[in-house]
Image: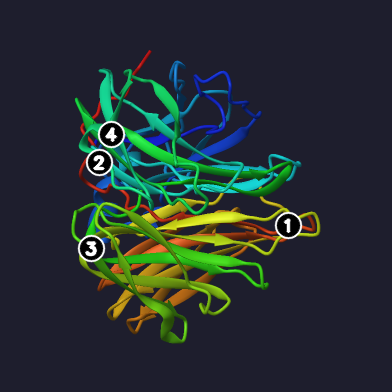
Amino acid sequence: MTSTVLVCPGPEQQGLTDATVPEQVQRVTVTARSSPLAALPAEVAAQVGPSAAGASGELLIVPTGATPAAGPSSRGSDADVVLEGAQGAVVQARGPLAAGVAATQVHLSLQEQSRGLEVTPCLPPAEESWLLAGGGQAGRLERLVLLNPGTDPVTATVTVLDRDRSPDPRDGADVVVPGGGRMVRLIDAGTERGSAPAVRVSTAGGPVAAFLADRWLQGSTDRGLELTTPTSPPARRQVIPGVVRAAGSDARTRVRVAVPGAEQAVVQIRALTRQGPVRLQQDVTLVSGGRTQDIEVSDLPPGRHGLEVSSDVDVVVAASAQTEPGAAGAGGLAWSPATPPLHGMAGLVLDGPAPEQTGRVLQLTAVQPAAAEVVVVDDDGSVRRRRIELTGQDTSEVALGQSSRDVWVRPLAGQVHAAVVWELTDPGGDLLAVAPLPGLPLLRPVTSVEPVLP
């Protein structure tokens, strides 16, 4: 491992070229950190530890259009930046620090008409991404954020599947993302209530990082704000960790299913709870080929769960959760994408604005028996390690206190899926955020992209 490149979206509510759409002032915090040696596999730690030859490294965050500045050179140190305006950031890690590096973007606002909590992992660019979020309700807008960390322009083709119609092959819209550039585009989710967009981004000329923002402002009432990452590629079985069923009669949890192919999908959903699998009343649904459908899982028990979604054809899926509206009608919204099983290790930086009333929980989900080691690093540098055993068809949780600054997961056996759930209790309406744990590079480069160095 010599270098790693991760991409952070920046303030997603800023950067549209459409002057008719008002933009709100938004401020986000990005923090990057390399994992402690204790979280790395033993063979990797031996190659990148202090006793290894050439153990010095570099970790820095470069906002788009900015000039790189020197970063920390010791494992466990971090880099952070506050982004305001229409810009994202590229995380660059070189030398030993490139092994097991993670970065997280956090946005929190409790102000009226901009309320929301977003926790978004920074990701490597990809040549294909599927993103599910948004809806056709009045006042709901989806923004697609594309960033190109490379030096050459990349053409991204954006195709939208929806509930009410299948896309024509000619429907794909091409967006040219310049080298080192960032583009923000509105997604036309239709005008019918209940439309359920699923966005496919495919590229030519190189990979890009893609994120999808979902803002729901009903008149002047905040109904939710989310910035989600790509879901797992199309497959017949998908696992969604970190699915929340909030308390209250008006709280909602739904599963969005998109069928990329032309054949109808027979879809089954099963809840994977801490007590084991739970069959849902809505466990079998037919979804037309080339379309999407939202399935409300009204009998999902309150709490945090994993979901297993099975189909007879390839599908892409994600789950959404809405909190019970507060006294003024405001609420929270979170999307939980399906994730691939962890390989090597995964991690999430937990720094960022978080009031004391914010709860954070790591959730691990497995369909078959599995085991994982969880390493939590606190603000004082202390490291706590814990082995988690999953019997299969269940979930397990690890509470993350206010003093926890990052969490790392290393699978030991079986297939483990992981996400961190953030829950903020507020009189104006509770807020949610779900951050899936992305796999981290260890000894192989995550991408061949060379970042732009102005």
Mark 1 lies on a secondary structure that is loop
Mark 3 lies on a secondary structure that is loop
Q: Point out residue 135 in the picture as x, y percentages from the top left corner.
A: 50, 49
Look at 35% across and 55% down and name the residue there. 292
Q: Point out residue 2 in the picture as x, y percentages from the top left corner.
A: 24, 35
**Pointer 2 or 1: first along the chain:** 2
Give the residue type that dot 2 points to: Glu
Q: Alpha-carbon distance for marks 4 and 2?
A: 17 Å
Q: Alpha-carbon distance for marks 4 and 3?
A: 21 Å
Give the residue type that dot 4 points to: Asp
Q: Residues within 10 Å of mark 2 (few under 14, many from 20)?
A: some
Q: Which residue is labeled 2 in the image?
A: 128
Look at 49% across and 19% down and name the residue there. 17
Does residue 24 sit above or below 374 in this rendering? above
Looking at the image, residue 237 sits to the left or right of residue 351; the answer is left
Q: Which residue is labeled 3 in the image?
A: 264
**Pointer 4 or 1: first along the chain:** 4
**Pointer 4 or 3: first along the chain:** 4
Mark 4 lies on a secondary structure that is helix
- Image quadrant where one finds the N terminus: top left
- Of discs 4 and 2, which sits in the foreground? 4
Q: Point out residue 90 in the picture as x, y percentages from the top left corner.
A: 40, 30
Q: Which residue is labeled 1 in the image?
A: 429
Q: Which mark is residue 312?
A: none
Q: Which residue is labeled 4 in the image?
A: 171
Q: Point out residue 157 in the picture as x, y percentages from the top left corner.
A: 27, 31
- Of discs 1 and 3, which sits in the foreground? 3
